[in-house]
Image (tube, coloured by chain):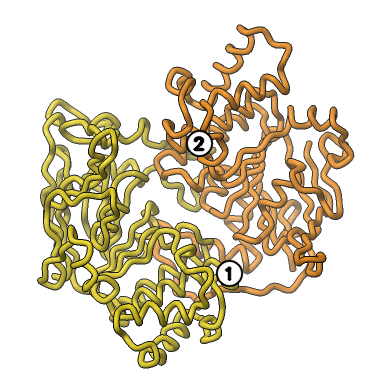
């Protein structure tokens, strides 16, 4: 088991009180697994991704543990985490395209970064060239500034860079969202290839796009308002979702071939609750068509069928 | 209604205008009342530039855009105001379309001051009420709020309502749902479908073929500033003729089928050709 997260709680401190962005999540990611993390904006998916590598100043680790390859990650301790970052845990941040230092040539930037971790650039150079070639870039990019590359090229540079030390865990946050369909496909397939070549052991792909996850992920974890909603193997979860939220989310996606004149799709009415003072019980209750009296009590996140987890009183195996 | 004839846009860059980039090249199509036309292309295909030229935010280099038979670029101050009373745009990022310092009501007040100064207070509030209801917003939830208090979907619908307060005939919708969550996306699309039933013509600019297919009557596929294929949506989607259209369709992630293994294709070059008819109203470049 590569990554085990147990009852993790991370709150944002604000002047109005604590925003309970991540409220008790428990899951595991196996060796070689690509896990998709899906949900609407503000559901806590980015917070979860960031918690595993670096808590920023506003984020506070309230409770819970994270272990990677059997070693506890000191996620609440910023300086102790330094030993793990880049070597063990690596992230491709949201807006990776603007993550590159604009006033450094790509090669020099990579060299400085490796230097800061005590790794020799010259020794890594052949492997770097090999991996750049793998994603369709030649060594020339090392002599260029980020502004000279296209969005997709920068995305690929960041991918290669963040996996250069073969981390155990890669977190890819909205990696494909800003890209065109063709580039999106190429970059998504790259994630699979990096896993297949063992450049990374396990990957968490954070996105709001379930259809991308269906293409590349082994399992999918759906979040809503800081809580886990459903987890299962990718194909099973999209074919036969257990939780009403997942069902509605999938129902609102237009597939190629569906037209408004033939089949009118519906969105999900209402909006997610404020996490400053979240409601008790099931957090999806107000928007859920199946809600009943018992939903005032919080449903546990339990295994409904083998490998399929859901937090809903009404979820049952088909 | 709105007609583009051989519209071309050349941008010059460099200190002395040294390099010329042709963003849009010889684009011709039209939008009729009660019709949604999707303009589909990847980034850099010139789709946004086409929308901006229609809204006269960017001048055309060559060719003409005509509204009701009259060349848009010839409009003077008064005619232009009249034009904006009938043709409006909504853009991609709802969060940066508002001034964060003011309440959202201000976007309506500015429309009133500029275009409808003659209305009485009651007429105005009725009109505003109706426009908000048309986009499925409850005025109580919206008015008097600041932009940061509303969700992206609400802000985007509000911008459509702002355009509807005027009796517009054409709406240019540039990537209006790409920044919204999946659960609210479809509601905004359905609003466009409702407005179309009432006779509004919409230019729906997008890079997402699934969305373009869901909503539109006709599609125009743009590659590097040139139209490579266009025609009625069902025909183009059931029988894509141009390799670029096929490639785009094959890359759309779906929940029902996995991607086919195709050679990795980060960049593609195209040789210029001309549009030829496949059948009576379906054209492809070859």
Q: Position of residue B166 (x, y in %)?
A: 68, 24
Q: Pointer 2: residues within 10 angstroms few (<14), some, or many (20+)?
A: many
B106 lies above or below A274: above
Measuring 49% from the left and 77% from the top, which residue is drawn there?
A106
Image-quadrant location for residue A282: top left
Label the orange chain with its letter. Answer: B
A21 with respect to A100 (left or right): left
Measuring 30% from the left and 79% from the top, which residue is drawn there?
A117
Which structural element holds mark 1? helix
Please indicate, yes or no, whether residue A144 appears anywhere in the rendered image.
yes
Closer to the camera, A110 or B163? A110
- The N terminus of chain A is located in which quarter? bottom left
B6 lies above or below A276: below
Residue at which label 2 appears: B188
Per the model, the C-alpha gap separating discs 2 and 1 is 35 Å
Q: Pointer 1: residues within 10 angstroms few (<14), some, or many (20+)?
A: some
A57 with respect to B70 (left or right): left
Measuring 40% from the left and 77% from the top, which residue is drawn there?
A160
Measuring 30% from the left and 60% from the top, which residue is drawn there?
A36
Q: Position of residue A74 (x, y in %)?
A: 15, 63
Please indicate, yes or no, whether residue A238 appears anywhere in the rendered image.
no
Closer to the camera, A295 or A136? A136
Label 2: chain letter = B
Closer to the camera, A120 or A222? A120
Label 1: chain letter = A
Which structural element holds mark 2? helix
Q: Position of residue B59 (x, y in %)?
A: 80, 48
Residue at which label 1 appears: A147
């Amino acid at each position: 088991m590569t990554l085990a997260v147990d009852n993790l709680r991370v709150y944002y401190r604000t002047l109005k009180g604590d925003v309970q962005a991540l409220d008790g999540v428990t899951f595991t990611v196996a060796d070689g697994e690509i896990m998709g993390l899906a949900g609407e904006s503000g559901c806590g998916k980015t917070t979860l991704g960031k918690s595993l590598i670096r808590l920023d100043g506003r984020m506070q680790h309230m409770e819970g543990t994270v272990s990677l390859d059997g070693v506890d990650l000191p996620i609440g301790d910023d300086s102790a985490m330094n030993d793990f970052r880049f070597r063990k845990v690596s992230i491709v941040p949201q807006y990776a395209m603007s993550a590159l230092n604009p006033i450094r040539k790509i090669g020099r930037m990579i060299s400085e970064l490796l230097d800061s971790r005590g790794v020799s650039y010259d020794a890594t150079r052949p492997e770097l060239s090999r991996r750049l070639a793998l994603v369709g870039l030649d060594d020339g990019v090392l002599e260029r500034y980020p502004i000279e590359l296209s969005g997709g090229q920068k995305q690929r540079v960041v991918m290669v860079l963040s996996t250069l030390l073969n981390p155990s865990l890669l977190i890819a946050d909205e990696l494909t969202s800003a890209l065109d369909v063709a580039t999106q496909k190429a970059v998504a397939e790259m994630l699979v290839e990096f896993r297949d070549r063992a450049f990374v052991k396990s990957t968490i792909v954070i996105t709001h796009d379930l259809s991308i996850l269906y293409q590349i992920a082994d399992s999918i974890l759906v979040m809503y308002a800081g809580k886990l909603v459903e987890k299962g193997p990718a194909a099973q979860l999209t074919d036969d979702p257990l939780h009403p939220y997942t069902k509605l989310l999938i129902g609102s996606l237009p597939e190629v071939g569906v037209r408004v004149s033939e089949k009118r799709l519906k969105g999900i009415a209402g909006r997610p609750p404020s996490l400053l003072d979240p409601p008790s019980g099931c957090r999806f209750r107000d928007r859920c068509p199946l809600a009943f009296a018992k939903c005032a009590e919080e449903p546990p996140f339990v295994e409904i069928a083998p490998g399929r987890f859901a937090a809903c009183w009404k979820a049952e195996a088909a | 209604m709105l007609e583009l004839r051989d519209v071309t846009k050349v941008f010059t860059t460099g200190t002395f205008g040294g390099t010329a980039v042709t963003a849009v090249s010889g684009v011709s199509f039209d939008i009729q009342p009660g019709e949604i036309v999707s303009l589909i292309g990847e980034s850099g295909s010139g789709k946004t530039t086409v929308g901006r030229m229609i809204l006269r935010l960017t001048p055309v280099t060559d060719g003409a855009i005509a509204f009701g038979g009259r060349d848009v670029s010839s409009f003077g101050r008064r005619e232009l105001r009249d034009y904006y009373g009938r043709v409006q745009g909504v853009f991609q990022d709802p969060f940066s379309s508002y001034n964060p310092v003011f309440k959202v009501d201000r976007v309506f007040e500015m429309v009133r001051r500029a275009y409808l100064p003659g209305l009485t207070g009651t007429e105005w509030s009725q009109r505003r009420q109706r426009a908000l209801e048309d986009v499925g917003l409850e005025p109580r939830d919206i008015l008097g709020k600041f932009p940061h208090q509303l969700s992206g979907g609400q802000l985007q619908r509000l911008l459509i309502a702002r355009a509807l307060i005027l009796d517009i005939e054409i709406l240019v919708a540039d990537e209006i749902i790409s920044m919204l969550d999946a659960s609210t996306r479809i509601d905004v699309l359905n609003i466009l479908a409702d407005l179309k039933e009432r006779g509004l013509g919409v230019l729906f600019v997008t890079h997402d073929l699934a969305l373009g297919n869901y909503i539109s009557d006709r599609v125009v596929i743009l590659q590097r500033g040139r139209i490579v294929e266009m025609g009625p949506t069902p025909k183009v989607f059931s029988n894509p003729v141009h390799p670029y259209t096929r490639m785009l369709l094959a890359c759309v992630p779906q929940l029902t089928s996995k991607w086919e293994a195709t050679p990795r294709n980060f960049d593609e070059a195209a040789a210029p050709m001309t549009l030829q008819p496949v059948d009576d109203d379906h054209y492809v470049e070859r």
